[in-house]
Image (tube, rainbow, N blue to C red):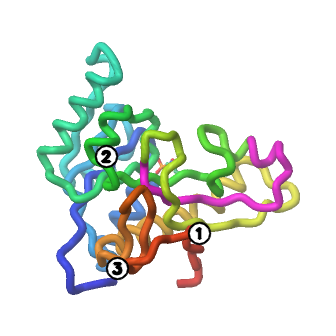
Amino acid sequence: MNGSASPLQIVVLLSGSGTTLQAIIDEMQAGNINVEIKAVISDQSQATGLTRAENAGIETCALSPRDYPDRQGFDHALASCIDRYKPQYIVLAGFMRILGKSFVERFAGKILNIHPSLLPRFRGLDTYARVLEAGDAEHGTSVHFVTAELDGGPLIMQSRVKVLEGDDEESLSARVKERERKMYPAVLDMIAAKRIEMKDGQAWLDNQPLDHPLEFDPSK
Ligand code: GRF
């Protein structure tokens, strides 16, 4: 962990079980990453991820899309909620809503996402079913900056797993999620250390544009 800089202040957005959030909390509490979660926000008031946040003493907020006339209205309320916490980065961890262009532009270069595929392969939903159907030899997960293009922003880091004989969605997702739980906190710590940023529409590492995503080393 980079101990010298002040902790990276983040807000996490999620819709579901929050195992990815939990991994970040665990690494934070173990002192392995220099990150502080200011709040966890969900579009689902029943999301288990909110309970995980509460158990860790983190502020939570739920906003229901049904309370707003359109996407813009919801995005605006979400942005106002986020602004209260003045985070340096917004971290999507299983947030199942598409964010509109004006939201993304408002926080340009400061939104991260983790997507369960080796982007640009398999943008969108159901990546496990689609990779099995396609018969690919490998699958994986990608951390990227968010732009208005769905799952299309600059890639930061990827982790590959082999698709094994007899794999189904459950077995494959278990192996990919295990990697996600290590890789996302690792990327956040590199951002905290000011090693990674988005500039001129590209991801940069140590002041050099990243031509290829970094490969996550699971042994570390
Ligand atoms: C993760 O697998 C991530 O790749 C995707 O959503 C999933 C969230 O799972 N974007 P959880 O809610 O953190 O368990």
Q: Quadrant of the N terminus?
A: bottom left
Question: In the rendered structure, which segment of residues is drawn in magenta?
Answer: 130-146
Q: Label 1: state its secondary structure.
A: loop
Is 104 rendered above or below residue 10?
Answer: above
Judged left or right of residue 26, residue 55 is: left
Disc 2 residue crowd, few under 14, some 14–19, many 20+, Cα 10 Å: some
Residue 165: x and y in percent read 87, 59
The residue pinned by badge 1 equals: 212
Judged left or right of residue 197, residue 140 is: right
23 and 78: which is toward the camera: 78
Q: Are marks 2 and 3 in contact (CB under 8 Å)?
A: no
Name the residue: 68% across, 50% down.
121
The residue pinned by badge 2 equals: 51
Q: Quadrant of residue 25?
A: bottom left
Tell me how far mark 2 sits from mark 1, CA to CA: 37 Å
Name the residue: 37% across, 32% down.
100
Q: Residue 2, labelled with which disc?
A: none
Q: Nearer the viewer, mark 3 or mark 1?
A: 1
Residue 138 lies in the magenta-colored region: yes
Q: Residue 32, labelled with which disc?
A: 3
Disc 1 residue crowd, few under 14, some 14–19, many 20+, Cα 10 Å: few
Residue lying at the far front of the rendered structure: 200
